[in-house]
Amino acid sequence: MAAEPGPAPDRAADTTAARPADTPATTGAPAAVGAPADAAAETAADAPAAPGGFAGWRGRRPFWGGLLVVLAGAEILFTEKAPMRMVIRIGMLGLAGYIVPALMVLCGLLLIFHPVQRVFYSVLAALATLGTWVTSNLGGFFIGLLLGLIGSSLAFGWLPDQPRRRRVLRREAKREATPA
């Protein structure tokens, strides 16, 4: 009997998984041929552990960029409910005034929960944000426009598998040095 294929591998977890900086898989150096197996375990144990829980999950995706895009879309949708004196665009653009910010919220959520396609979602979010200038009260009275552009830029510039910063490494070393 042939084995049934399992579920498709999750590419997001594969490309954004945090790895210790000095393991042979990331340095490209092959493991020593005659080295005992516990020597490799010792080098992996010496490496600083990746943060777990919510902080680790947040670090493997463009979280802050996606969150800013979601907040921008929500703010722009909120300004659509402004009193009639404050509403600048009404009429045929009224439907687009709801669709474009909803697209921004969707792009922000996809940036957070599906980071593999972050470039496409961030470009789409930036274009939708610029579209709110015309369709939704000057981009939610400039606040949503600025939040959306900053968030989509952060998401576009985010890269997975970056080496840990010196400041983070120093903080972890200081935390390990102090007795708990």
Image: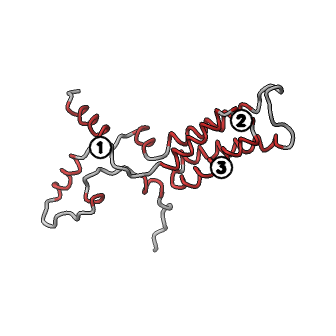
Q: Quadrant of the C terminus?
A: top left
C-alpha separation, residue under disc 3 versus residue under disc 2: 16 Å
Quadrant of res 100: top right
Give the class, few, some or many, for how many residues have Cα within 10 Å of label 1's Cα (few <14, many ≥20): few
Of 46 and 121, nearer the camera is 121
Quadrant of res 134: top right
C-alpha separation, residue under disc 1 versus residue under disc 2: 41 Å
Query: Whole-percent x and y of residue 46?
Result: 21, 46
User: Which residue is labeled 3 in the image?
Assistant: 127
**Would residue 104 be found to the left or right of residue 24 on screen?**
right
**Label number found at residue 49:** 1
Mark nearest the camera among 1 and 2 is 2
Query: Whole-percent x and y of residue 17?
Result: 40, 52
CB contact under 8 Å: marks 1 and 2: no
User: Which residue is labeled 2 in the image?
Assistant: 77
Query: Whole-percent x and y of residue 105?
Result: 64, 42
Say what amino acid the circle numbered 2 marks: Leu
N-terminal of the pair, mark 1 or mark 2, is 1
- Disc 2 element: helix
**Would residue 4 be found to the left or right of residue 89 on screen?**
left
